[in-house]
Each structure stands twice: as C-alpha cells, then as structure tokens.
Image (cartoon, rainbow, N blue to C red):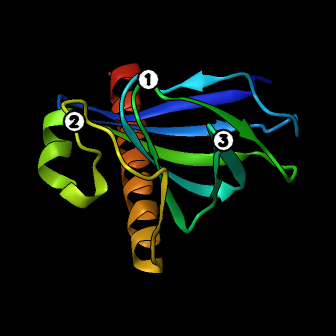
Amino acid sequence: MPEFTVQYLLRSPTVTIRDVCCQGSSPHPSAEECATATQLVFPYRGVYVRHLGHDQAVAEANQVLFFNATEGYRVTHPVPGGDACLTLAISEAQLRELAPLTFLRDGATLAFRHQRLRIDARAQALVALLRTACARTSRNLWRQRAWP
C-alpha cells in the first residue's frame, strides 16, 4: 500500500481541493518535502508534527496549517495510524484578496507568517461538510463519465 493517497475533489482556476491520506508508517522524520503552491491544510483524522526549521506544529483536527510554496519541511507521526487532511490550494490572487494582511509576511511573494492557527468546532464542521460535498460530487461525476 502506498504511503500517500491523494484524491482530487475539485479543480478550478481559483482552487484545487484534495483529500490526502498518509499511512504514517514510520515514526522517524520524513525526507524533506516542499509544497509547490501555498496551501491551507485541514487535518481531520490522526496526528502528525510538521517541522519547519526549528519551529514545530502539531497537526490535528482543531488546526489549519499554512504550507507556503517552496518552503521545505519534514513530518513525523508521533502516534500510529497516519493522518488525513483536506488541502486547499487557492490561487494567489484569491488568497491576497481573502487573507487578512496580519496573517501574511511582508514582501512581494505571498507567504503566511505562521505555520498554523487554531480553528473552532464550527470551522471543523464546515471543513467536514466541504469534504463530504466535494467527495460526493466527485464520485457522481466519475460515475457519469464511466457509465454513459
């Protein structure tokens, strides 16, 4: 079984939504990874720790993690069972419009100041609704294409 599975739930010019599951089979730090685009990552199952330089963030269901494009990081899984996350890669133009300026670093390149933010139960429920609705729509579109 692969270490990662990725299911694309939505692809549009402004946002790509993916459901990413990781087996978390090793408690040791992963090889360095790098996001190709700035992403908002909403863990919904399991736990992992993201190591960004000397900073660490525990990724769990009450957090949103900010993955800045081209920023190297490592991941560890302190408990068995892996994790699952909903990732949103939002176009830079949309992020600049939506993100509060206090969340962004100064400079021409779009990047978040912090690597995580706590979210409340309402935000967690909205993320779950988004994931479920996108997954249902994705399955229905696949069925329509596979069985004319």
Q: Earlier in the sequence, mark 3 or mark 2?
A: 3
Q: Amino acid at mark 1?
A: Thr
Quadrant in which residue 142 is drawn: top left
Under circle 1, the secondary element is loop
Residue in the image at 45% along x and 70% along y: 119
Q: Amino acid at mark 3?
A: His
Nearer the observer, disc 2 or disc 1?
A: 2
Q: Given the current orientation, which residue lies at the most extreme bottom position? A: 121
- Residue 53 at x, y = what percent? 62, 37
Residue 51 circle label = 3
Under circle 3, the secondary element is strand
- Residue 24 at x, y = what percent? 79, 39
Residue 134 circle label = none
Q: CA distance from mark 3 to mark 2?
A: 23 Å
Q: Which residue is mark 1?
A: 70
Residues 143 and 112: in front is 112
Residue in the image at 57% along x and 38% along y: 20
- Residue 95 at x, y = what percent? 21, 44
Nearer the observer, disc 3 or disc 2?
A: 2
Q: Amino acid at mark 2?
A: Gly
Q: Earlier in the sequence, mark 2 or mark 1?
A: 1
Asked if 115 appears above or below 76 in the picture, the reply is: below
Q: Count all numbered tags in the image, as a single digit.
A: 3
Q: CA distance from mark 2 to mark 1?
A: 15 Å
Q: Which residue is mark 2?
A: 107
Q: Is there CB contact under 8 Å for labels 2 and 1?
A: no
